Amino acid sequence: MNAQAKPSLLAKFGDRYAVDPNKMFETLKATAFKQRDGSAPSNEQMMALLVVADQYRLNPFTREIYAFPDKQNGIVPVVGVDGWSRIINGHPEFDGMEFRYSDALVTPPGASAPSHEWVECVMYRKDRGRPIVVREYLDEVYRAPFKEGMKGPWQTHTKRFLRHKAMIQCARLAFGFVGIFDEDEAGRIAEQSERDMGAAQVVREQAKALPACPEEQIEKYAAVVESGQRPAEQIISMLQTRYELTPGQRSALLEVATTQGDQA
């Protein structure tokens, strides 16, 4: 007898929320997973988000999970604080948590009030003899205002955001939660992606802007190679940062080195 076929991912979600799977798919596209520019994610991106939501049994309709676009047309699955709290409390081995705070207070740039220098999260598992402890330092996670004179959540709710950071990082170590991020992390991922793209563009533009290497330079450095002061490979590497070398120019320098070696 054939094994009963497993329901599709869409069917599972439809059954869970008692809605038609196709209608649910389109509704999520237009609501929970709608992008900031108003566009809907692709079907492939939607399925990736639903896989994560299903893995952690997160409810996208209550914003326990939502989509954050990166700069390379990708999607970062973001789990809100309520979502993190629910999957932590829903883990069968979870046995409570507590927080510890530094006595020292600091006021980072732009913050509305002083905050703890660090926060520790302590999580207990039923199957472990010792708790998992993670300390998060404010100076390592604090985000300055996006624009001068404007205040974001890190400026208005510094203590709360630092506590959230400690809880999330501790949960990752305690229960192995992977592939999900909070919004702050997703924003940093997008920023890094944008910086990487910008750096790559600068490299491409610089490469295009390199002038042709004058023959006088080749003759000058050929004499340097011939005298044994510097090897040809080093000369070629140096020149390539300033000029666009032709294959013939590289060969000329290498031939000088070869001739010098034969005469040695």
Image (cartoon, grey):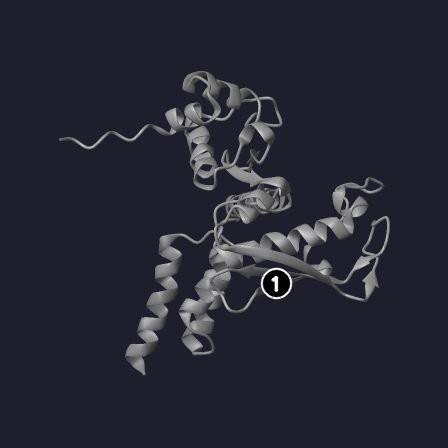
Task: Give the residue number, with chain letter if any, for mark 1.
Answer: 134
Residue at left 83%, top 50%? 111
Task: Give how far across and how far down residue 217 sits, in percent.
Answer: 50, 61
Q: Amino acid at mark 1?
A: Val
Q: Is residue 25 left or right of residue 139?
A: left
* Residue 209 seen from this side: no
Nearest the viewer among 22 and 140 is 22
Residue at left 31%, top 73%? 259
Q: How many marks?
A: 1
Q: Relative to 147, does residue 253 appear above or below in the rendering? A: below
Q: Is residue 61 left or right of residue 254?
A: right
Nearest the viewer among 20 and 194 is 20
Quarter of the rendering containing residue 152 = top right
Give the position of the N terminus as an image quadrant: top left
Task: Give how far across and how far down residue 23 sits, in percent.
Answer: 46, 16
Nearest the viewer among 183 and 191 is 183
Task: Give how far across and how far down residue 132 sits, in percent.
Answer: 56, 64
